[in-house]
Image (cartoon, rainbow, N blue to C red):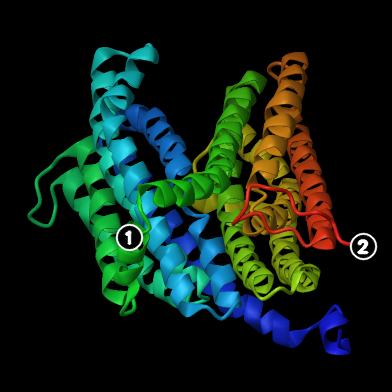
Amino acid sequence: MSTARTRLLDLGAMREVIRVSVPLMFGMVGNLVLMLVDRICLARYSEDALKASGPAVFTATTVIMVTTGAVGITRSYVAQAHGRGDERGARDEGANGVVLALLLSALLLLATPLLTRMPQLSGQPAHIEALEAQFLGLSTVYGSVMTLNMALSSYFNGMGRTRIPMTVGIIGQAVGVVMTIGLVFGRFGLPEMGMRGSALGTLSAVSVMCLGYVVCLPRGYASGLVRLVRQGVRQVAQVLWLRLRRGAPAGGSLSLEELGQTAFVWLAGVLGSVALAANNVALALNYAAVIPLIGLGMGCNILCGKAVGAGRHRDIPHIMRVTLMTSGVYVAVVAVLQIATPTLLLSPFGLDGADSAVTGHAVDTSRVLWTYSAAFMFSMVGSGVLECLGLARFGFVARIVLMWVLCVPTITVFVLLNRDRPDMLPIMWVIFSAFEAAMAVVCLWRVRRAVAGEENRLHTTDPVQQTA
């Protein structure tokens, strides 16, 4: 391997990581803006809408992440085919993802009656339950379109053409912002629909994105669907079943992470109402800080998948080092700002006008948020590489053990021993970060083993024997 490839600072590789990852980062930021606009609109529409939006949005997001995460494995299949130089194969892999997305979308729509009954378990007043059911009834509709969009965007991302999903996403998000404001409040000549308008605003955004992806698809893409159907029912079932087995753990892991974040919020409330308010502000800042890291993790996933497809497993550690070096610079800058200027960073997230006690504890918490960003940086890269190797199941099991068997019980005991002590909130965050760091260590260990054995399980159910 050449010196240029082995040295830590490889400007060429860094440029490639940035080229692929930065558009993904902008796309994630656009999603964040749309989400914030949606929550602000519901908060200002009515107190009932605000109360109903939290459980409804959380429930819908958790369910939709299962289908979008499962379909997202398409990105790795396309990247491997692209790495082999098989452009027709890449289109076929993208078409396979679309078929899987259509099947999962149908299942999601069939689950609508069950989802709309879930608010009855919350014990909320009847009118709040009705608002939640309204939103959830429409969430499966926009969720099914999001699932299809994930398959379509995964083709472009797997090919390294990440600017197309970024452009399509920004256009759709802009439409979604306008439609959400209009449909919630009855502006721009649109009807006032409140909670239902929020869901329809999201539906308008993802529908525009879907149309954009279809317009941008290359010629011959549809022929991949025809070739898949011609293989016969048994072969099609085998292809889709293997893909589902490889992708479902990734979706499950995302849902578990979302559930873990929610459990963290609930447990923070045990430390007292002041801690809960301070944590809500800090959580918003932390979410905004780690969003770009998700884009970098996806970029690493794409580049490593391309390397695997080309039979260059030994390039994976180098790609990971460059990605971690790039994201490390970002985390370092954010950490300095969180430590030195916490009040300035927290003010856009609701700190202005807050109680002095809430402000003080939010500032103290902000100064330790960098620990989670640093740990998340490593776990995101490790999980992304495992996914491109067809090893997402390992990350899923590791997430179950570390998050739900160890982390949540540990934090539960901690908050019960420190009930009504908001000054313990920063320590609670450090504990949470420590388990995320453990997740990173486990994933990176498995990646190292997979690289040594040149594993690639996307196309087989059998483990690959390690080479000498």
Is label 1 in a helix, a strand or a loop? helix
Query: What residue is shown with label 1?
Result: 230
Give the residue displayed 30% in from the left and 56% down from the top.
206
Q: Are marks 2 and 1 in contact (CB under 8 Å)?
A: no
> Is residue 428 placed above or below 166 in the rendered structure?
above
> Is residue 145 placed above or below 398 in the rendered structure?
below
Query: What residue is shown with label 2?
Result: 468
Q: Amino acid at mark 2?
A: Ala
Q: Nearer the viewer, residue 6 or 371?
A: 6
Quarter placement of the N terminus: bottom right
Residue 399 is situated, as x and y percent measured from the top left of the image, at 68, 37
Q: Amino acid at mark 1?
A: Arg
Is label 2 in a helix, a strand or a loop? loop
Give the residue displayed 39% in from the left and 15% down from the top.
122
Whichever of labels 2 and 1 marks the residue nearer the N terminus, that label is 1
Quarter placement of the C terminus: bottom right
Give the residue displayed 44% in from the left and 76% down from the top.
88
Q: Is residue 78 visible?
A: yes
